[in-house]
Amino acid sequence: MAIGLGFGAVAPLVLGQLAGDDLPVPALFAVYPMPLLKAAAFGLLAAAAFSLAPLARARTTPPSSLFRRDLAGRLTFGIEVIVAILAGLGLAGLAVITAPTPVAAGIMIAGVAVSFGLLWALGRGAAWLAGKARGLTRGPVKIGIANLAGPRSAARTAAPAIGLGVALLSAVVLIQSALLNQISTVAPKTAPAMVFTEIPGERAGEFDAVVGQAFGRPLTDDNWLRAPYFTGRIVRVKGEIVDREQIAQGERWAYDNDIGMSAIGAEPNDAGIVSGRWWPEGYGGPPLVALEEDAARGGGLKVGDMVTISVLGREMDLKVAVLRKVEWGGFGPAFAVILSPNALEGASLRQVAIARADKAQEDRVTRALGRTFPMVNVISVREQLEAATEMFDRLALAVRGAAGVAALAGLLVLAGAIAAGARARAREAATLKVLGGSRLQILTAYGVEYGAVGLIAGVAGVALGYAAAWPVVVLVFEADWSVDWGGVAALLGGASGLAFIGGLLAAMQALSKRPAPVLRTE
């Protein structure tokens, strides 16, 4: 543990020298005592949780059985097991307490525990299926399958650890690929290319003419949307003062502060109407309002209810005419609250606009507005998306590195399983050589066994990673789901390939010993 703490303290300093200028945010690399103390606590609790049970089994092993090479001591419920359970609970509790979001940490711990249980059961099931399938094979493949079904099968020991590491890596890869696809592919097709703010309302027609001339094409509903913009606050719902404490945290944003609003006449494109009917062009009746569905849900509002909004220094009562789903990154009116124009008749309002354009059109309109409308802010969404993609790539590298540590831990478990069974493997290889087995046949048998373990763990890990990544992408980020099949194939190939190489190394180590000394050793 001390060696690990030393490496952990030095690694950020080395990383700062190698990648300090390439990070998307400024960072101060130094030795921080508190994170090291937390790491030491995690290390001590983990060591106690995973080492006391084997020590308890060793304590119950009778000395006489050592001479019979019978080391199968029974695990009894004693002080070691009690302390191991307490250490495991302390490890989980420390992870939850020190996490920035304890609820998320608890959910992750529960997910890891369930995943490990599923992988353990899968390893047992794979060993059982291998026992049933070995009769269908021949030669070295049959030997490898039989080893997979045997009592020292790596499917029982290494598959859960490898699968958990692959699950973490695959979840990161799938989330990253889906979000990058959203930023680099989906968003440019659905989002506006340009955003304009601070447009003088009295010169809106002149502004449209300048933009259309610079674009070299007419402004239509498919490529252009301009609307008034102002801020206001919902102060009463159904005649009652808003009690923010009674509103769910995820919906309180519409009631805590002033929010962006607009006033639009005829129904715009991509209005996203969930219920109700939009008012017609030139509507002159009582003021109406269209609410974003989450904001309406927070106040318990439905079509036909009354809501009071404080805007431009006065309060006005409006009837809810429309509930709508807002696609905040789409090409539509991204306002939580939209009033019918007659509610603010006579008010001089600044306006905002969005447009679809290519790079050349962006350059032309920016130059044209710089001459005629210098007060208007021009925002290139394309540049923001490119910057977001670059930053996300850099941050994802660090996350992939952390998940890679988990995968490395699984490979270390595989190495430990190989090392623990080295003596038995040497006797097995010696016996096969005496019976006429060639080096190629023995290498093939070991490669089949460990390659199958890696493939089984890889497939299970990718499935678990898929199950973890989908709700994050679709429900949390509300992005389109897409799968990086190249990354998935690389993970499967890496898991099975590294396990296969481990099997070959185990076979080569066993074959390096002469049969006679190995078989004479008791």
Image (tube, rainbow, N blue to C red):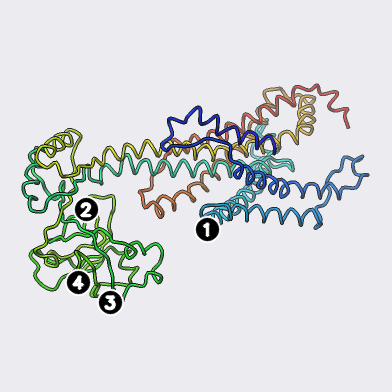
| Lower position in the chain sequence, tag 4 or tag 2 | 4
Query: Which tag is nearer the camera, tag 4 or tag 3?
Result: 4
- 456, 16: nearer the viewer: 16
| Lower position in the chain sequence, tag 4 or tag 3 | 3
| Lower position in the chain sequence, tag 1 or tag 4 | 1
| Lower position in the chain sequence, tag 3 or tag 2 | 3
Q: Amino acid at mark 4?
A: Met
- 356, 98: nearer the viewer: 98
Q: How many marks?
A: 4
Q: Gap in Å between the C-alphas at discs 3 and 2?
A: 28 Å
Q: Could you tell whether 479 is left or right of 415 in the image? A: left
Q: Which residue is mark 3?
A: 238
The numbered disc on residue 77 is none
Query: Which tag is nearer the camera, tag 4 or tag 2?
Result: 4
Give the SS element for disc 2.
Answer: loop
Q: Could you tell whether 168 is left or right of 360 in the image? A: right
Neighbours of disc 2 within 10 Å: few (<14), some (14-19), many (20+): many
Neighbours of disc 1 within 10 Å: few (<14), some (14-19), many (20+): few
Q: Which residue is mark 1?
A: 103
Q: Gap in Å between the C-alphas at discs 1 and 3?
A: 34 Å
Is the C-beta separation of discs 4 and 3 under 8 Å?
no
Across and down, in percent, residue 305 comes to 25, 75
Please name the residue shown 60% across and 52% down the image. Answer: 95
The numbered disc on residue 316 is 4
Q: Could you tell whether 50 is left or right of 58 in the image? A: left
Across and down, in percent, residue 438 comes to 71, 22
Q: Gap in Å between the C-alphas at discs 4 and 2?
A: 26 Å
The numbered disc on residue 332 is 2
Give the SS element for disc 3.
Answer: loop
Q: Gap in Å between the C-alphas at discs 1 and 4?
A: 40 Å
| Lower position in the chain sequence, tag 1 or tag 3 | 1
Is the C-beta separation of discs 1 and 2 under 8 Å?
no
